[in-house]
Structure formats: structure tokens, C-alpha cells
Amino acid sequence: MSTTTARPAQSQTPLVQVAVPPHSIFSELRAMRIVWRRDLIRFVNDRIRMLATLVQPLLFLFVLGSGLQQLSSASTHGVNLKTFIYPGVLCIAVMFTAMFSAASIVWDREFGFLREMLVAPVRRSSIVIGKCFGGATVACTQGVIMLLLAPLVGVPYSLALIVGVFSLQLILAFTITAFGVMIAARIKQMQAFFGVMQMLVVPMFFISGALFPVANLPGWLTFLNRIDPLTYAVDPMKKLVFSTINISPEARRVLDPGVTWFGWHVPALVSVAVVLGLGLVMLGIAIWEFSTTE
Amino acid sequence: MTGGNGNRAPVAIEVRGLVKNYDEVEAVRGVEFEVATGEVFGFLGPNGAGKTTTINMLCTLVTPTAGSARVAGHDVVKERTDVRRNIGLVFQDPTLDNYLTAVQNLRLHAELYGLQRDVVAPRMRQVLEMVGLWERKDSPVGTFSGGMRRRLEIARGMMHSPRVLFLDEPTIGLDPQTRRSIWSYIAELKEREDITIFMTTHYMDEAEWCDRIAIMDNGEIVALDAPETLKAQVGTDRITIHTEDNDAAIAALKDRFDVDARISEGAVSFGVPGGEEFVPRLFAELGVPIKAVNVSRPTLDDVFMSYTGTTIRDAEEDAGKNRNRMMMQMMHGGRR
């Protein structure tokens, strides 16, 4: 071997032989896991983002909750407004973080890293699934912080509450990330992505009934509410939180009337299935979008 | 040379009638070539000639409109994953995660490529030492200079011991000193690893590093051979003169010496056999005052000029005019 460049120290070390193994289910799982882990590593390194995404739910809960309390005490049957909007806040806590996680795909595209993932010898589906789980996991850490605040708004800890809320948050975060990734496949610029997400997610949040009971609404709003996917995450969350607190049946009827389809009360499990089903469909679309090359 | 792998194909890349159209634009118009295993093969041409599109088709990122290509023995359309397992890529634009450290970037790559866990650490050390970044292995990539990032990309491209390494403009945007060091890494790589290198460049001097080069212009290969052979084919020396009146000089050259000259970069340029003997006649007979004269042996620039009728820099300026409008649209609202 002739050494044209003077780098004697390395020429002595033997060459480490590496081979890329044939494609298998294990290589797909490893790819999925590393995409998921990258989201976590980046999230842990980014303390500012961690704090920033907590601001919004805290504002809703404590500022809006305390502020509007004066106006609403008559109609909430003695239930604190903070307690009432707590289930909705548990939902937005994961929603906005999940949205940010999906946004990182657009970011990765702008800064080129997406290409490194897309040329790897693995299926695009592994990359997209890893990404959705990464977004869901990151969002849930935010959700857990909000969950820990439960006693401050008059909701006592219980095993059912913690397990139930966490599972619901996980499903919601997964669906929102899948939604974001689906959008990110088509949109190449960060500003445009946030524009579209704000345009869709903020109205979805307001219409979902996170901040008001969903019975006796004007017709147009009832219609929008029933077609808003987020409604089906907020409703079971409300049922779950209200089932762990002690309030009068009358208050429960007013504050948690439940979602109805043409007069039929939609059970919580059906609502959850709607959210999960939508998430899986959007995941499928996202995979399809990323799998088609130029 | 290291490694005597017996069962590998003698042809690393085989391209037949490759075409790529974008809407109305014919980016690549039926290119054909073969690259032998172990070769350093260069694609030379101005920006917009179709080099990157060709590379993107070879590394399975873009589907060809027509034609076929095999890389490391696998079809780039039908056996995408197999092609990807066998190639390493260093793109023109950075593709590192700036928030991760050098080691985290390499480890991510190793996981994506499913490398055996026990070789990951020693291989990582090897490639990082090769590009002189071992001491900075735990620094976030965001703190690296442009040259360091490019070196890390080369190290990452080598991480999984690819059989073909694609380098798309590996030295673009780097200062001359860093460019030289990148080239010495690539030369060392070729010495140490049993690898075929396919690269694109629009720097003429860098094409000299290649065993063979293909000159690409307007989506087509106009010449393909070893740099020395291409230069020998030009057969003439290049004379460049600065005069008071370039148009008169061109007319006089045609009239008195039957030489076709053209204006390039503000000077009159033409090729003649035996340039040094020609200069005294030029001064005696041209009849247009000459301010300065330069005689040079054929370079790749001359090769490019003899095949395309323009210098690579002029070709880029022309292409640039058309591209500017597109670029403005692309840049609008986005940062590159």
C-alpha cells in the first residue's frame, strides 16, 4: 500500500470490515427505534422548547380558568371552572407538542437531514412510524406534567385517572403527529407548515368543546363540533376526569352532557376508536406520501 | 490495496440510455457509461448540466423517465434497497443533524443501516480518525466549520463500507485549503478501502484527480476518457491575447491566419498547434496592438471548450441567467 499522504498513525491500524446485513424485519425495527430515539435526544437537549410548549396549556388552565370563574360560577353548579376545563387542557398539552414534533420533518427537509433518512436501506414506513412514535412520546412527557397538576384544580390522583389520561394522551398525540407528518410530506417550508397547522389545529381545538359543554349549542356549531375529530378525544377525557370527582348529578349533566349522534350517546370507547382509527388512516397516507419518489 | 474480494462485479456502475424529464425540461438526455470497480470517476460540467440529477437517479432518490442503471450489480429501480445497502452518499447540501454530536450522527447512521453492533465503535473511530475529527467526536455538529462538516459527511458516507461512494460536489463552497485537504482524504480513502468513487465537480483542477472523467453539458455526455487523453486530443496550445480592439483582432486572426477565435472572459482566445512558435508571427502580422499574451498547454478547460464551444465559467453564467428566476421562487420564504 502506498501512502501518498502523510498519516502514518492510521495506516498501521487494520481496516475494520463492516457489512450492511440483508434487509430484514430487525433492520426495520432498529431504524424505527433510532428515529424515535433521535426525537427524544433532541427534545431532552432542548429545554427551552420543553418550557415553551407548557406555557399555552398553563395559560388556558390558570389564567382563563381563574379569570372567567367570576362570570361562570352561577352556571357551573359550584364546580370550579379550572376543574371544568382541565380535561380540555390535558388534550391541548399534547396537541401542540405533537404538532411541533411533526414540524421537525419540515425542518429536517430544510436542513437536509431528511435525505439521510430517506436514502437509508430501510422502508419509508419505518421512518414515518418511528417519527410518529417519537412525536407521541415527546408529547406525552408534556402531558404527564399537566397530569401531575391534577390536585391543583381539585382532581385527586387515582390509578384510573393516571392510566386513563395517559393512554388517551398517547393516542391523541399519536394521531396529531400522524396528522402533522401527513401534512409535512406535502409542505416544504416551515412558515407554510405552521400556517396550515394553525389554520387547522386552533379551530379544531376551539370547536372541540374543550372549553364548553357540547349540548344545546347552535345548530351550526353542533354540526362543526360533531365532525371535529378532536371532539372525540376531549369527550372521553371529560368523562374520565369527571368520573373521579365528586359533583352533583345535576352539575354532571350540565357540564358533561356527552357527544350525541342524532340523539345517540356516543360511548367513550367508540370515541377513542374514532381518534385511533383516524390516526392510523393518516399514518397510512403519510407512509404512502413518503414512499412515492420523484 | 486492501481486501481481495473475489466475487464482486468488475463493473461498479452501468448506465444505459438514462433519461430524466421534469415537466418540459429535459434534465438528462440519454446518458450511457460504465464505471469499473476501483475507479475514481468524475462528472464534470457547469451547474445545471444534469450531474446532480444523474447522481440522484443512481442513488435511487429519483426515478428515471427512461433507460436503466445498475449500481454494485443491482437495478436502481427494481432493487432499490439493495442499491442503498451498497452505496455511500455525500450530498452537495449538508445532511447532518446539527443538534447531535459527531458520534451521535454516526451512530444514527449505523442504526439506520443495521450495522453489526460490535463493529460500530471501532469503525466509527476509524472513519473519524481518517478525516481528522476523532478529537471532536463529542462536539455538536452545529459548532463545526463548513470544512469539518463536509469531512464528517464523508466519514459518515464511509461508515458502512459502501462499495460505491457518491460524492456530489464534495468541495463546493469550501476555501482552497480545505478543498485540498478534502482531496487528500479522498485519495487516502481510495488507497485504504476497496471502493469505487463516483463524483461530480465543476472545478476543472479537481477533475484531474479522477481516473476518467465524463464531460457533461446540457444533459448529455459530450466526452468521456482519462483527463490526459482528453487533453492530448485537443492537440493545440491555447493562446489568449488582450488587445485594444477584440473584434478587430478576431477578424484579423481569421483573415491572416485562418484561425477561429472567440472572446472568453474579456480576452481573445484561440487554439493553434505549436503556440510558442506562433507568438512572433502574431506580433508581426496581426496589425492590432496586443497588450498582453499568454500561451498555455491544453487544460481540461480547453477540453471543455473544444467540446462545448464555451468555457465552463461562461456556461455557468448563461445557465445562471435562466436559473436566477427559478432560484428566486425557490428561495422565497425558505432558507437554504
Image (cartoon, coloured by chain):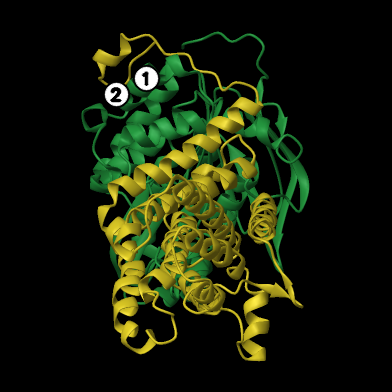
Residue at image mark 1: B121
Residue B214: image quadrant is top right
Question: Tag 1, which secondary structure?
Answer: helix
Q: From mark 2 to mark 1, how far is it between C-alphas?
A: 12 Å
The nearer-to-camera label among 2 and 1 is 1
Residue in the picture at 59% in, 70% down: A231
Q: Position of residue A224 (x, y in %)?
A: 64, 81
Q: Chain of mark 1?
A: B
Residue at image mark 2: B129
Q: Please tell me which residue lies in front, B273 or A234.
A: A234
Q: Position of residue A171 (x, y in %)?
A: 56, 53
B76 horizontally vs A36: left or right: right
| Quadrant of the rendering where the C terminus of chain A is positioned | bottom right
**Amino acid type, residue under disc 2 in the picture:** Glu
B129 horizontally vs A185: left or right: left
Work out whether B241 lies above or below A137.
Answer: below
Q: Colour of chain A?
A: yellow
Q: Please tell me which residue lies in front, A108 or B31.
A: A108
Q: Position of residue B38 (x, y in %)?
A: 55, 22
| Quadrant of the rendering where the N terminus of chain A is positioned | top left
Residue in the picture at 51% in, 50% down: A164
Chain identifier, colour green: B
Task: Tell which circle, 2 or 1, labels the residue nearer the N-terminal end.
Answer: 1
Does label 1 lie on the same chain as label 2? yes
Callout 1: few (<14), some (14-19), or many (20+) C-alpha neighbours within 10 Å?
Answer: some
Work out whether A268 lies above or below B14.
Answer: below
